[in-house]
Amino acid sequence: MKDVTITARRGLLVILSSPSGAGKSTLAKRLRKWDNSIVFSVSATTRAPRPGEVDGQDYHFLPEGDFKAQVARGEMLEHAHVFGNFYGSPRLPVQAAIDSGQDVLFDIDWQGAQQIRNSVLGQHTLSIFLLPPSIEELRRRLEARGQDKPDVIKRRMQKSWDEISHWDGYDFVLINDDLSATEARLKTIIEATRLRRIQRPDLTDHVRALQQEFEELS
């Protein structure tokens, strides 16, 4: 019988969500360093490029009419209207990536996560929500970053509870009380989910080969 090596798999749509300051961006970077085949989803937007931004690398910059047409054709996995502009995740590049076995990482909120889970690629989605150990610690982390003025931190804190209240819509929820431990749990979750039957199209051929071998031995 011909040797069969089981290696092929479909990629995952890995969604990371959290309130600002819970460690999402840091953990996303660590995942990319751990496995550089994981790619970030490049969003589409109708806003104008900022100095230094590259089309197709930072964003896919689209006229509003083109963006709306893609939404109407079902070519956006998720989309939203934010501060006068549209943002969304184009389906075709994500489809191509997961068909080639690459995982695609999404840094989006609960509304975008819900849209992706309900999309045509929803069965390949892995969604993870990160909780802070406490609200006090969340504020401390925001202040320690030194990136925002006090009024911005106040707005982020006010928004955080709305985000946290949707924690139960995710596949996994992790309390990020220790960055290294949370990173290890994330890797374990991703490695296990990669082995789901639906992510392994090669298994059908392998089982057929086993069946043929069994029949030949009978």
Image (cartoon, rainbow, N blue to C red):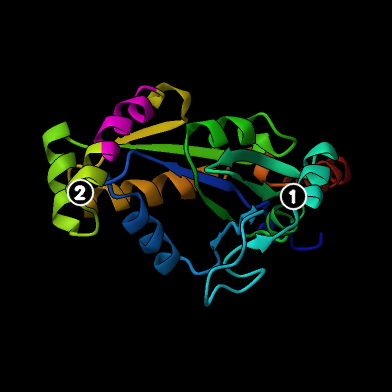
In the rendered image, residue 54, in percent from the top left (x then y), is placed at 61, 74
Residue type at mark 2 is Leu
User: How would you classify the magenta stretch by its main secondary structure?
Assistant: helix
List the residue tagged with mark 1.
64
> On the image, numbered disc 2 is attached to which residue?
142
| Residue situated in front as seen by the camera: 197 or 124 | 124
Task: Give the magenta-colored segment's residue range.
Answer: 155-165
Say whether marks 1 and 2 touch (CB < 8 Å).
no
Q: Is residue 180 left or right of residue 212?
A: left
Element marked by disc 1? helix
Q: CA distance from mark 1 to mark 2?
A: 34 Å
Question: Which mark is drawn over residue 88?
Answer: none
Location of the C terminus by quadrant is top right
Mark 1 crowdedness (10 Å alpha carbons): few <14, some 14-19, many ≥20: some
Closer to the camera: disc 1 or disc 2?
1
Quarter of the rendering occupied by the N terminus: bottom right
* The one of 15 and 146 positioned closer to us in this rendering: 146
What residue sits 39% from the left and 52% below the top? 187
Whether residue 153 appears in magenta in the rendering, the answer is no
Which x, y percent locates residue 141? 17, 49
Residue drawn at (61%, 55%) of the image: 43
- Can residue 120 be spotted in the picture? yes
Query: 10 Å neighbourhood of mark 2: few (<14), some, or many (≥20)?
Result: many
Q: 169 or 190: which is nearer to us?
A: 169
Relative image position of residue 76 (x, y in whole percent) = 72, 44
Is 163 covered by the magenta stretch? yes
The amino acid type found where label 1 is placed reads Glu
Residue 146 drawn at (x, y percent):
18, 59
